[in-house]
Image: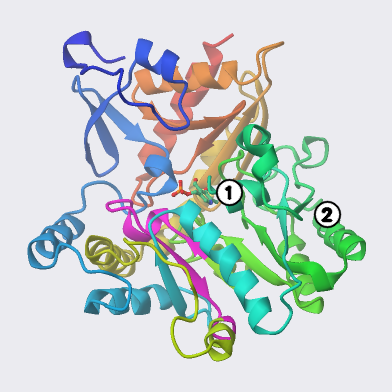
């Protein structure tokens, strides 16, 4: 907890996805970040077990990125992105393309994951319209999916509290696949669960119900992060790909957290060997140093939309800050670090150690599941009677006080550190979680 002397007036800021009233009674304020550590305003070091919000993959305070942003701010602070360009926006698109699966080489820049998701959904609708199938407007998401907070994203998303207040205003015609989480079958799985591939067949049921001619796209996170680390069952993504292809439905992978090394490959698509038609990106794309996002698009989808348009603007969509010069400078510097330091390979090499350390908690107090893939682990706790989420919230607070930053969703703890983490720090994170669990009712 931060000492009162260091705390500014907290009343004006309405904090996002935060229990504002509780936070303001016991604020946790960060002041600095370097490498694997945050420093709080009262000088406490906190080991970053979550890469910020799954985004600081190269670690904090990277001088190459800081220099690139500073130089760019002095050189060209802003360039309009409509009907004008600047060279680094094209260079950054090329650099992103180099990390995408073959053929996904058209890049649309945004500023966040939510914008990337809504952009991808709009591209899917525009594509079918360009092909003369404008009646394909239905979008299919998945229960427990998180796709940001735009109206498109919450419509295809599958998290009830994010939807219920807005239920009258969600996109029409959306349907949802079932989620793949079943602890009675898959508890304590290392890597991909063996059970659950058949859940992709539910897409055939949805297609039979609505008819393929009405469905534009299916969107899933290849590995669902925010909803509590749900690892796709073996064969599941392959099956979704086969069914979407068979019915002419676009497949969108929301790779906002999985791209740029989280699983030990440039993308989850590369890791699983399954290539979607569109991919939403953000977070690690700029190491979170400047807000940035993108949609990677298969060339054929892009060419279809451009080819069908009359002379003039082909796609009526974009943001004032698409390819903002500071963002493209940050993207170029970040992707260079990933390549030069071989951080994705490093993540892959570390993931066995990370898996072992996580699974040491299988028998820890309150733990009902440990799951993992690449550099992500989820630890699910038994909820307290009548107070779901309270136990994980307490563990999160205690770990923070003991110098470890985690995330939690409901009663699931998520760990997703920067890819520069050392083995001893992996041990420290899981060791401290174990000790805190032992000490928690
Ligand atoms: C899979 C996924 N999609 C979209 C988003 C939304 O990104 P943002 O918060 O940058 O809008 C997130 C954020 O965690 C995410 O995990």
User: What residue do we see at 52% from left, 86% from top?
Assistant: 306
User: What residue do we see at 71% from left, 11% from top?
Assistant: 385
In the image, residue 395 lies at what x, y percent?
50, 19
Taking the image as shown, residue 295 lies to the left or right of residue 163, namely: left
**Could you tell me which quadrant the N terminus lies in?**
top left
State which quadrant residue 2 falls in. top left
- Determine crowd level at label 2: few under 14, some 14-19, many 20+ residues with C-alpha closer than 10 A: some
Q: Nearer the viewer, mark 2 or mark 1?
A: 1
- Secondary element under disc 2, as helix, strand or loop, is helix
The question of residue 291 being in magenta is answered with: yes
Taking the image as shown, residue 298 lies to the left or right of residue 334, namely: right
Does residue 5 lie above or below 264 as drawn?
above
The question of residue 254 being in magenta is answered with: no
- Secondary element under disc 1, as helix, strand or loop, is helix
Q: Which mark is residue 170?
A: none
Please say if the residues under marks 2 and 1 sit with CB atoms less than 8 Å apart: no
Q: Which mark is residue 151?
A: 1
In the image, residue 220 lies at what x, y percent?
66, 57
Q: Nearer the viewer, residue 4 or 413?
A: 4
Who comes first in sequence, dot 2 or dot 1?
Answer: 1
Mark 2 close to ligand 1, CB under 8 Å: no
| Chosen colour scheme | rainbow
In the image, residue 87 lies at what x, y percent?
23, 79
Exactly how many numbered labels are in the figure? 2
Magenta-colored span: 280-301
Does residue 46 lie above or below 317 as drawn?
above
* Pointer 2 residue: 199
User: What residue do we see at 32% from left, 21% from top?
Assistant: 28
In the image, residue 206 lies at what x, y percent?
86, 59
Q: Nearer the viewer, residue 25 or 138?
A: 138
- Determine crowd level at label 1: few under 14, some 14-19, many 20+ residues with C-alpha closer than 10 A: some
Residue 383 seen in the figure:
yes
């Amino acid at each position: 907890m931060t000492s009162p002397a260091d705390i500014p007036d907290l009343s004006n800021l309405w904090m996002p996805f935060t229990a504002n009233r509780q936070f303001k009674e016991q604020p946790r304020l960060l002041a600095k970040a370097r490498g694997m550590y945050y420093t709080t305003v009262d000088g406490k070091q906190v080991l970053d077990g979550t890469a910020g919000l799954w985004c600081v993959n190269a670690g904090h305070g990277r001088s190459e990125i800081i220099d690139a942003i500073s130089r760019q701010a002095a050189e060209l602070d802003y360039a309009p992105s409509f009907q004008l360009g600047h060279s680094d926006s094209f260079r950054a698109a090329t650099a992103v393309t180099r990390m995408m699966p073959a053929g996904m080489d058209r890049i649309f820049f945004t500023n966040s994951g939510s914008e990337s998701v809504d952009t991808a959904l709009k591209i899917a609708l525009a594509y079918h319209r360009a092909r003369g199938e404008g009646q394909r407007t239905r979008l299919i998401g998945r229960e427990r999916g998180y796709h940001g907070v735009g109206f498109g994203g919450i419509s295809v998303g599958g998290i009830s509290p994010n939807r219920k207040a807005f239920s009258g205003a969600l996109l029409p015609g959306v349907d949802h696949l079932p989620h793949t989480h079943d602890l009675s079958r898959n508890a304590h799985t290392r890597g991909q669960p063996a059970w659950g591939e058949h859940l992709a067949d539910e897409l055939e049921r949805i297609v039979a119900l609505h008819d393929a001619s009405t469905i534009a796209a299916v969107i899933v996170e290849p590995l669902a992060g925010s909803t509590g680390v749900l690892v796709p069952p073996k064969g599941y993504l392959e099956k979704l790909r086969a069914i979407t292809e068979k019915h002419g439905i676009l497949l969108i992978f929301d790779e906002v957290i999985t791209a740029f090394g989280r699983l030990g490959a440039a993308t989850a698509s590369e890791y699983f060997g399954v290539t979607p038609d569109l991919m939403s990106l953000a977070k690690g794309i700029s190491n979170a140093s400047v807000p940035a996002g993108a949609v990677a698009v298969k060339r054929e989808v892009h060419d279809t939309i451009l080819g069908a348009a009359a002379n003039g603007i082909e796609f009526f969509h974009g943001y004032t800050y698409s390819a903002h010069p500071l963002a493209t400078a940050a993207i170029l510097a970040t992707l260079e670090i990933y390549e030069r330091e071989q951080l994705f390979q490093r993540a892959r090499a570390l993931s066995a150690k990370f898996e072992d350390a996580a699974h040491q908690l299988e028998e820890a107090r309150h733990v009902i599941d440990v799951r993992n893939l690449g550099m992500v682990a989820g630890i699910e706790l038994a909820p307290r009677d009548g107070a779901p989420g309270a136990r994980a919230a307490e563990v999160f607070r205690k770990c923070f006080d003991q110098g470890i930053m985690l995330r939690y969703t409901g009663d699931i703890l998520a760990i997703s550190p920067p890819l520069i983490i050392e083995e001893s720090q992996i041990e420290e994170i899981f060791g401290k979680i174990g000790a805190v669990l032992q000490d928690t009712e």
